[in-house]
Every structure is written in C-alpha cells, then in structure tokens.
Image (tube, coloured by chain):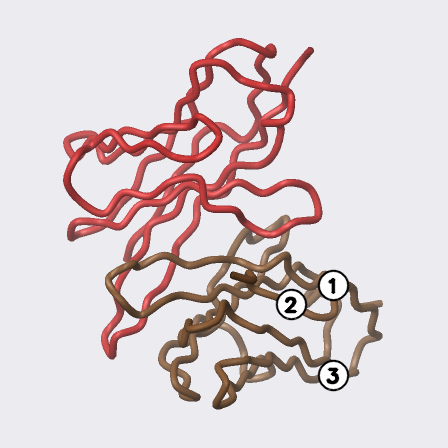
C-alpha cells in the first residue's frame, strides 16, 4: 500500500506570493491533517479535513486554508506569504476506524525569500 | 489543554549503548501516546503507540516504551543503539476532538547523536 504522498517536495517563493501544497493520503484513509514544523515553534497542528469538510483548525491566521476533494486528496494554500511561513509542511492521513494513528508524508519544504 | 515535554534537547550515546528518551505529558483523560522518528529532510515515521492495555509496548527497530500513569510519562528505550538510529525523536499525545476529529500535540523533540 502506498504511503502519504506530498508534492512538491521543495518550493521557493517570495513574500506576498501565494502557494498551494498537495497531499494524497493512504488509500482508504478519509482524514487528512496538516502540520507546520519550524525550528522555533516545533510541530503545530494547522487543520484536519474529513469527507471534504474542515473538521478542526489550529491557531493560524486566515491566510492558511485548505480543502479536500472527493477522492480524499487535500490541498493547503497559503496566501500573502511572509518570511515566517518558511517551514516544513507535513500532511498526515488517518483511518477513521478503530486505529487512531496518523501516518505522515515526507513533507514539503517551503522557503519564503 | 494537553501538552508534551521532552526535557532533553540533545542526547549523545555510543553505538551499542542503551538509550532512554524521556517524555512527560499533561492530559486530562486517558491519552493516546506515540513516538515518531524523523531523519533529516524526511517526514515522521511512527515507532510505536500506546492506546490502552499492557503498559510496555514494543515498536519497530527494536524500540519499546513504557506508559506510567502515576508519573505521566511515556519514555522510549532501546537496549543497544545502532549508528542508524541517529535522528530526531518526537513524543506526541493524540486527542479526540468534538465532531470526531483528531489532533496530535508534539513535544519539542530530542536530537539523538550516536558516536561510533
């Protein structure tokens, strides 16, 4: 079974631009969560999507948004990029059965110049 | 709100030596507890998990962890470290959210260096 796939692996953007990151979950998983990892703040929860609906949201500004498609693939968008948005963005998928485990992709490394 | 503390930011051990990484959590209910490992430039790989039952859990790569409710701890151990174990290790607590969602709260991580 293929794991969680995130594309692209690396991105370089400039301040003020917007960016879209993509995540394909493990086949059969319907829940997708996004996390931001930075040296200063560590790993922080951004939001979770299930059945195309945002179910939960972390403490991030409205510039961070996401969506989920009917095939459970998810995208995350960051508008009006700031230098502080430079981070590793990790996607995790979870089966909604009794196994309450999140499986992570390799991440997208975003650098904002 | 739940929180996770990993008191050791860096740990250095010699190859073949035993290892214990500490994790303390704060959570009102019975927690879901996890250890993940992250190699440079990579995502998080699940090492092991605790949901309920036997408090000593076995994971991949020879790792084990013990849940101690009285100490609010979930320390990770390995009897003999290999050079390939050098990585960053994260302890996390999972929490079910209203509406059926789920969220992980992570510790700040422990960077493990292995000396040959």
Q: Secondary structure at mark 3?
A: loop
Q: Residues within 10 Å of mark 2 (few under 14, many from 20)?
A: many
Separation (CA) of disc 3 from disc 2: 18 Å
Separation (CA) of disc 1 from disc 2: 7 Å
CB under 8 Å between callouts 3 and 2? no
Q: Residues within 10 Å of mark 3 (few under 14, many from 20)?
A: some
Q: Residue at x 33, y 31 (%)?
A: B58
Left or right position of B41 against A100: right
Left or right position of B54 against A37: left
Where is residue B63, by image quadrant? top left
Chain letter, colour brown in render: A
Is residue A21 or residue B47 the one in the foreground? B47
Q: Residue at x 74, y 83 (%)?
A: A18
Same chain for the residues at labels 1 and 3, yes or no? yes
Q: Secondary structure at mark 2?
A: strand
From the top left corner, tell me how far across and down residue A105 is, in percent.
58, 60
From the top left corner, tell me how far across and down residue B64 is, in percent.
36, 28
Where is residue B23, by image quadrant? top left
From the top left corner, tell me how far across and down residue A85 is, in percent.
68, 67
* Disc 2 target residue: A6
Q: Residues within 10 Å of mark 1 (few under 14, many from 20)?
A: some
Q: Residue at x 28, y 33 (%)?
A: B57
Chain letter, colour red in render: B
Where is residue A94, by image quadrant? bottom left
Q: Nearer the viewer, mark 1 or mark 3?
A: 1
Label ID, residue A18: 3
Between discs 3 and 2, the one toward the N terminus: 2
* Disc 1 target residue: A9
Q: Residue furthest front?
A: A1
């Amino acid at each position: 079974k293929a794991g969680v796939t995130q594309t692209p692996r690396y991105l370089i953007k400039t301040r003020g631009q917007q960016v879209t990151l993509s995540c394909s979950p493990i086949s059969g998983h319907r829940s997708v969560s996004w996390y931001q990892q930075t040296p200063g703040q560590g790993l922080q929860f951004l939001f979770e999507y299930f059945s195309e609906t945002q179910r939960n949201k972390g403490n991030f500004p409205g510039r961070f948004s996401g969506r989920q498609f009917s095939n459970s693939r998810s995208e995350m968008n960051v508008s009006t990029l700031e230098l502080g948005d430079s981070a590793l963005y990790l996607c995790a998928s979870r089966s909604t059965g009794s196994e309450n485990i999140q499986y992570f992709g390799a991440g997208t490394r975003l650098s904002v110049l | 709100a739940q929180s996770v503390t990993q008191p050791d930011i860096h740990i250095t051990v010699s190859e073949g030596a035993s290892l214990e990484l500490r994790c303390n959590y704060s959570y009102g209910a019975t927690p879901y507890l996890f250890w993940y490992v992250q190699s440079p430039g990579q995502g998080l790989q699940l090492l092991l998990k605790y949901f309920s039952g036997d408090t000593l859990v076995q994971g991949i790569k020879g790792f084990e962890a013990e849940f101690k409710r009285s100490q609010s701890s979930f320390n990770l151990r390995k009897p003999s470290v290999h050079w390939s174990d050098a990585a960053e290790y994260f302890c996390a607590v999972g929490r079910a959210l209203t509406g059926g969602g789920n969220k992980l709260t992570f510790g700040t991580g422990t960077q493990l260096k292995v000396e040959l």
